[in-house]
Image (cartoon, rainbow, N blue to C red):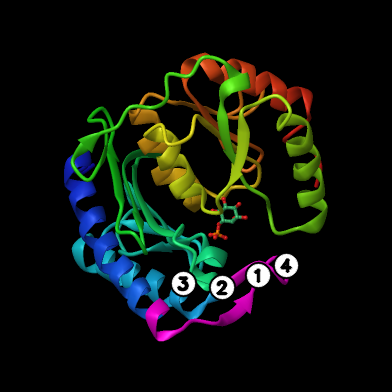
Amino acid sequence: MDSAPAPRELLEIAIDVARDAAATAYRMRAEGVSVAATKSTVTDVVTAADRAVERQITDALRRLRPADAVLGEEYGAAELGTEAPARVRWIVDPIDGTVNYLYGLPHCGVSIAAEVDGEVVAGVVRNIQTGEEWTASVGEGAWRDGRRLRCSTETDLGQALVVTGFGYDPARRAHQARVVAELITQVRDIRRLGAAAIDLCLVAEGRADAYYEKGLAAWDQAAGALVATEAGLLIGGLEGLTPGPDMVIAAPPALFGPLHDRLAALDASGGP
Ligand code: LIP
């Protein structure tokens, strides 16, 4: 079996590809975007830019790493090469925060993670509008624009600024809103920003204290979760489960337990 590339080498590729992708998304936004189609519900939209940017990313990865695999939000899974199952898989969200992108809200980004033998070892999240860029490679820390990131040192959940999100299905939103209605009385405040990849990066650098959300796909959280982990956050699901569609919690070690227990008590991973 070929030796896998170093996380640093994969990160360099992810950064270059993400920068070009963000530039395309920025240009297409300036030219005007509209809803091209809807997915799970009428509010789960995709624009022509989501599709064009994902094709651009996949084509670039095929050129640079023809033997790898890709999992993207819009076009799903693809083996770039014809050889044996790939050791490296790229997990791509071309535009995370598509509704924000559609409305011109500056909280949307390109997210690219590199996974080797099933473990995410490198990731980049680039804000399309602001150009902020968060990066991480396993064991080498999390960075934003050359500054090493450290998460919040808050130890009191009652003083914590917590970021979360809602799905596109009205019934799920109703359940998530009930959880927020309770939790908001037990924390400093809640923020709903609208792009999990960037939300995780903001918590990684202490611009909020903790994050949780039900319903995330791998492409929403893969790169952001590595940035968060490398900045000192604990990432997990409820009841010892791995972070996934049921629940993703990201919090500093002192807050993870208290937040986990509140969310478990509120059945936050329950409902539709
Ligand atoms: C979005 C997530 C966000 C979530 C939204 C949506 P998309 O991803 O990043 O955290 O609250 O419902 O899933 O659809 O913009 O790629």
Quadrant the N terminus occupies: top left
Q: Which residue is mark 2?
A: 46
Quadrant hosting ligand 1: bottom right
The one of 255 and 53 positioned closer to us in this rendering: 255
Of the numbered discs 3 and 1, the one sitting upstream in the chain is 1
Q: Is residue 94 visible?
A: yes
- Pointer 2 or 4: first along the chain: 4
Q: Amino acid at mark 2?
A: Val
Residue 249 lies, in percent from the top left, at: 57, 31
Which element type, helix, strand or loop, lies under badge 1?
A: loop
Q: Are marks 3 and 4 in contact (CB under 8 Å)?
A: no
The answer to whether the residue labelled 2 contacts the one labelled 3, judged by CB atoms less than 8 Å apart, is yes
Disc 3 residue type (three-letter): Asp
- Which residue corresponds to the image point at 78% horizontal and 37% vertical from the top-left? 181
Closer to the N terminus: mark 3 or mark 4?
4
Question: What residue is drawn where x is 56% and y is 15%?
Answer: 156
Q: Note whether 75 is above or below 135 in the view shown.
A: below
Q: CA distance from mark 2 to mark 3?
A: 6 Å
Q: Is residue 45 left or right of residue 98?
A: right
Name the secondary structure under disc 3. Answer: helix
Image: magenta residue range: 29-45
Q: Are the two marked residues, 3 and 1, in contact with CB atoms closer than 8 angstroms?
A: no
- The residue that mark 3 highlights is 50
Q: Amino acid at mark 1?
A: Lys
Element type at mark 4: loop
Nearer to me, 161 or 55: 161
Label 4: which residue? 41
Identify the residue shown where x is 43% and y is 26%.
Answer: 233
N-terminal-most mark, 1 or 2 = 1
